[in-house]
Image: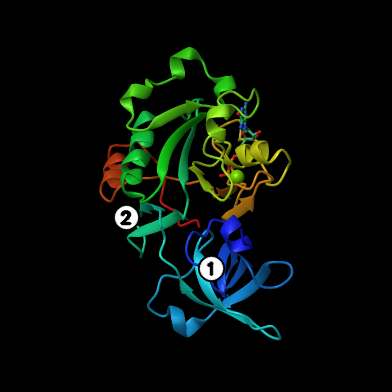
Amino acid sequence: MTRIEQFGWRGAVEPGLGRVVSAHGDYYHLVCNEQLTGEILARKKKSAFRDATPPMTGDFVRFLHNKSGESLVLEVLPRFSHFERKDPGARRSSQTLAVNFDALFIMMSLNENFSLPRLERYLALAEDIGKAKAVVLLTKSDLASAAAIPTPAALSCRVLRVSSVTGEGMDAVREYVAPASTVALVGSSGVGKSTLLNFLAGEEIAATQEVQEWSGKGRHTTTSRELVMLPCGAMVLDTPGIREVGRIGEVELLQAKGESSHRWRNKS
Ligand SMILES: Nc1nc2c(ncn2[C@@H]2O[C@H](COP(=O)(O)OP(=O)(O)OP(=O)(O)O)[C@@H](O)[C@H]2O)c(=O)[nH]1
Ligand SMILES: [Mg+2]
């Protein structure tokens, strides 16, 4: 298996194929079969993206390798899966949160922030993710009282109770963590996405931070998407916490009813 295939590429292997592991403005850190290191920093070719969707972490791209100068990203290759939230207040009508994952872990903690309506909104958005499975991870099960646990039968996909403290549910989680496959982690700030990444990696790869005691809400510790290769050969796409999910109209309605005081904020 070549390096790009280890990173999940399933098509014909050609020169100039890369996968974005992190994005930094117009620059993209790519893994690829080129260079001894198998890594390249390439810049987005502006004229190629005037009318096209720019690359993001997790994308497979075609790039022009320049051994003596700047390599250029030319094209984003078709995504086999994608997770988007609808964004009523913003210029764009939706925001893509994760791409090219085999499994989407929708994470919500089993503490006072648990909200079945919010979980249902996530699941509604996950109906149309492409070639991938959505799984609900109810995190911090070590903190949960029995009363806080919802009925899994009420949800349309598999529900796992997990804890990065006790290890509960991790055998089931590992069923999705297979070589050359990608698991994307989405959910509010503080639900334990980066902690799960670290648990699966067996080391502190990503920064994590305690949830603010007074609000129970997270602090947006992870600020950019990161595709991380685990020692077992699987990849995890860690994402910044989502402030709110919803469909156009729905969230505004909830806000009007006073059920949510959150304001939409574009965080990528
Ligand atoms: N008790 C308990 N605490 C956990 C568990 N998983 C994570 N935490 C704690 O929850 C806090 C937030 O965890 P993070 O992993 O930083 O959360 P995150 O989802 O990555 O947050 P953002 O990066 O802000 O989106 C940290 O203090 C973790 O130690 C768990 O299974 N049980
Ligand atoms: Mg994080």
What amino acid is found at the position of numbered circle 1 in the picture?
Val
Rendered residue at 46%/85% (across/down): 47
3D distance between C-alphas at marks 1 and 2:
40 Å
- Determine if residue 21 is in view: no
The disc, 1 or 2, on the residue closer to the chain's N-terminal end is 1
Residue 88: mark in rendering: 2
Residue 82: mark in rendering: none
SS class, disc 2: loop
Badge 1 vs badge 2, beta-carbon distance below 8 Å: no
Horizontal and vertical percent position of residue 58 = 52, 58
What amino acid is found at the position of numbered circle 2 in the picture?
Pro
Rendered residue at 46%/55% (across/down): 100
Quadrant in the picture for residue 26: bottom right
Which residue position holds label 1?
13
Of circles 1 and 2, the one toward us is 1
Decide if ligand 2 comes within 8 Å of the CB at mark 1. Answer: no
SS class, disc 1: loop
The local crowd at label 2, few if under 14, some if 14 to 19, many if 20 or more residues have their Cα within 10 Å, is: some
In the image, 12 versus 102, the foreground residue is 12
The local crowd at label 1, few if under 14, some if 14 to 19, many if 20 or more residues have their Cα within 10 Å, is: few
Horizontal and vertical percent position of residue 51 = 37, 78
Quadrant in the picture for the N terminus? bottom right
In the image, 11 versus 127, the foreground residue is 11
Quadrant in the picture for residue 216: top right
Q: Quadrant of ligand 2?
A: top right
Horizontal and vertical percent position of residue 12 = 49, 67
Q: With respect to residue 45, does 211 lie above or below? A: above
Q: With respect to residue 50, does 216 lie above or below? A: above
Horizontal and vertical percent position of residue 22 = 60, 61
